[in-house]
Every structure is written in C-alpha cells, then in structure tokens.
Image (tube, coloured by chain):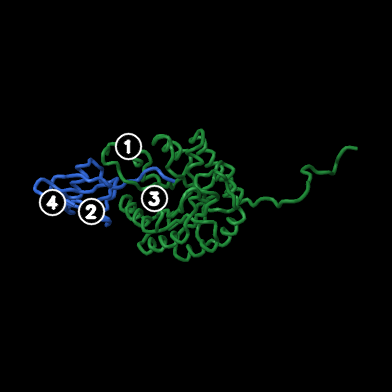
Amino acid sequence: MQQATADGLELTVNGERRRFPAPLTVAGLLAELDLDIRKVAVERNEEIVRRATYAETMLTSGDVLEIVHFIGGG
Amino acid sequence: MEDTWTVAGRTFQSRLIVGTGKYKDLPETAAAIEASGAEIVTVAVRRVNIADSGQPMLQDYVDPKKYTYLPNTAGCHTARDAVRTLRLAREAGGWNLVKLEVLGPPPHLYPDMPATMEAAEALIKDGFEVMVYCADDPLAATRLEELGCVAIMPLGAPIGSGLGIQNPAMLSMMIEQAKVPLLVDAGVGTASDAAIGMELGCTAVLMNSAIAHAGNPVLMARAMKAAVEAGRLAYLAKRMPRRMGADPSSPLAGLIR
C-alpha cells in the first residue's frame, strides 16, 4: 500500500483503488464523488462513520471505504 | 372498523409489505408500490456506483418519508455480514427497524437458522428491532422471540419460487403460539396465496416477486392489496365449518306438489 504523498492519498473506495487530493475528509470525498450525503452511508476500515462527523473525519492513505445506499430489494 | 397492527411500537393499516426489487425500472417500482397500498417496503443495501453517481436512486421514486423503509440483509450468508450491512443501513436511514435474513446457498436459499440466531442476538444487543425471516420451525420461532425479535416471518415456500403456501398446517401452529406479529415472507405466487396466508391468521404478508414478476406488476399489486384485505376479513369473519356432504341452501319446506 502506498503512503501519503504531497500530491495526494490513495484510498480503496468500494473495492476500487483511487488517488485523491490531500487533505481529504469524508465530506470532501463524497463531494469529490458527487454523492448526496443524505442518501448514503460510509464505513471506514469496517467502522461506521457517523454522518455528523463527515466534515471532521480526515482520511489517510490506505483507508478502505465502503459507501452504500438503498436499492430495490425483497 | 379499525383493524391495525403494531410492530416495534409502530402502527400500520396495511397488512401487505412489499419488496422493491426485480422491477423493470424505478417508475414501475413506484407505481406498483403505490397500487399495493403498502406502508412498509423492504430495501437492500449495496455499494454506490462511484463511477456513475448521477444515476437515479430509489429514494427519488419511493419517498422514505411516505413509506417505512425496512432494510434487509439479502445476500448476506454470515451473521457478521448481516450485522455490518444493517449498521450501514441504520446510518443511511436513521432507523433501527430491520429485516434480518441469513440464507443458505442456492438452489434453496433456505434460512440458515444457526447463523440467523447469531445475527439476531448481535443486532438486538446493538439496539436494532429485528423482524426475522425464518424457517417454518416452531422451536426456532420461539427461540427468536425469546431473543427479542419483534416479528417472526417464516417462509411459505422458497424465496422467489411463487409456489404458494406449502405449509399451512405448520404456519397455523406457529401463529397459534406466536406472541409477536407473524408474517408469511416468501412463497406467494398469486392473489389467492396471499388470501390463504391471511385466512390462516397471519398478521401480514410480505412479497416481492409475485408482484414484480407478474405480467402486469401494477395490476397484480392491486390484486394483492384486495387479496390481503379479503383474507383478513375472512379470518375475522370466521369461516363456516367444513362438512362432508351437501346442505341445501334453499328451504325444503313449501315445495309445490
């Protein structure tokens, strides 16, 4: 796993490794991905990130994130 | 006549719970749910497509303020996955009423009861109110109630099979002993199946494929609404006794000679 560098950080988001500009909060990541924070939930390294803390939760290189939403199901 | 039912302190008029999966598209999902009269809808939790975040979302068509979302654990085959999924659902939706299902492998997708109990225990400890999909096993149902599940939801036939209610005798016995709402979940194929479930005395019926995979889902949703209401009324009205032989409906007195 790569370490944080001046030109960004590497995250695994929904199984996909991607580079993002640093520094980055969870709120920033969701904005970067153009996702509506009211419609998703975020897990960081298998821990739920509370919606109220998105703006202050700093991401670090190597973080594994799951971003989910509701879809049709039985 | 007011005839409501209550689960986890929430009261509902409709005794039909519908899934939101397997429809052609989101507009059809919305139209079928509207026609069904359901107040609770089951939903799944999945990764967002980060490559294409502009896609329409379920909430845009099925308003969570109008319908009670019941997040499920479909696709989870272990207690750990089920708990993780519903913790995310709780954060996404902000509520704790959930549908737990932990299934075995295809082709049966039969409820894995040891894993279901393990997950139920962990979820209840974590503050969830658990409506639980289960086998038609009265001992397992009692144990799930003792764990604190708020509704017991045995199958009438395998998920998505549309075979109808294959186990009316066992369901009747489970209804008899249940102290929390008992719902038939899975197996309904057409309207008469839903009516049979309600006539047995189920609190409500949960279905997805029977509506979504019908030739005309919106029309079938209407049929299911009517069938659940008819079955409920028939249950309350108490059916006539069965008799082995005919009993004339017209009086025999006063016949012409």
Camera-near label (2 vs 4) is 4
State the image coordinates of residue B225 (x, y, percent, origin top left): 52, 42
Q: Amino acid at mark 1?
A: Pro
- Could you say which chain is coloured green in the image? B
Check if mark 3's residue and mark 4's residue have beta carbons within 8 Å: no
Q: Amino acid at mark 3?
A: Pro
Q: Nearer the viewer, residue B4 or A55?
A: A55
Residue lying furthest right: B257
Camera-near label (2 vs 1) is 1
Checking the image for residue B56, the label placed there is 1
| Residues at marks 2 and 4 on the same chain | yes
Q: Quadrant of residue B194?
A: top right
As helix, strand or loop, the secondary structure at mark 4 comes to loop
Residue lying furthest left: A6
Q: Amino acid at mark 4?
A: Ala
Reading the image, the residue beneath label 4 is: A4
Disc 4 crowd rating (10 Å Cα; few below 14, some 14-19, many 20+) is: some
Reading the image, the residue beneath label 2 is: A52
- Could you say which chain is coloured blue in the image? A
Identify the residue shown where x is 39% and y is 43%. Answer: A72
Disc 3 crowd rating (10 Å Cα; few below 14, some 14-19, many 20+) is: many
Q: Chain of mark 2?
A: A
How far apart are the alpha carbons under marks 2 and 4?
Answer: 26 Å
| Residues at marks 4 and 1 on the same chain | no
